[in-house]
Image (spheres, grey):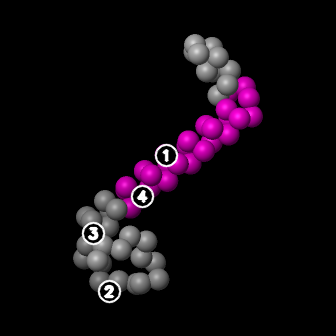
Amino acid sequence: MDFAELYHFLFETIEGIGCLIVACLVLTTIIAAILEYRTRKTFKDRGEKDTDTEFFDEE
């Protein structure tokens, strides 16, 4: 599969565009989770924890 075939698949077919959308959603979700974890690690001292909004249990 050369570059022209790959380009045609990704940008000119419905399945290729679907693959691009899914890949972007997965990538942004992973990046958001990593950044959220790093932010929580940096700002530990935020007062009492609200248990309803805890996404990452570190206990």
Q: What separation in Å lies between label 2 and label 1 (alpha carbons)?
A: 32 Å
| Residue type for callout 3 | Phe
For label 1, the residue is: 27
Crowd band around label 4 with a 10 angstrom C-alpha radius: few (<14), some (14–19), many (20+): few
Residue behind mark 3: 43
| Residue beneath disc 4 | 33
Per the picture, the main secondary structure of the magenta-coloured stretch is helix
In the image, taking residue 10 as reference, residue 32 lies left or right, namely left
Residue for badge 2: 48
Q: Is residue 15 left or right of residue 4?
A: right
The tag earlier along the polypeptide, 3 or 1, is 1
- Which residue is at the front of the view, 51 or 47? 51
Where residue 2 appears, as percent x and y from the top left, is 58, 13
What whole-number distance in Å separates the C-alpha atoms at marks 3 and 1?
A: 24 Å
Under tag 4, what secondary structure?
A: helix
Query: Callout 3: helix, strand or loop?
Result: loop
Give the distance between the C-alpha atoms of the residues marked 3 and 2, in whole angstroms.
Answer: 13 Å
Magenta residues (range): 11-36
Amino acid of disc 2 = Glu
Viewport quadrant of the C terminus = bottom left
Q: Are marks 3 and 1 in contact (CB under 8 Å)?
A: no
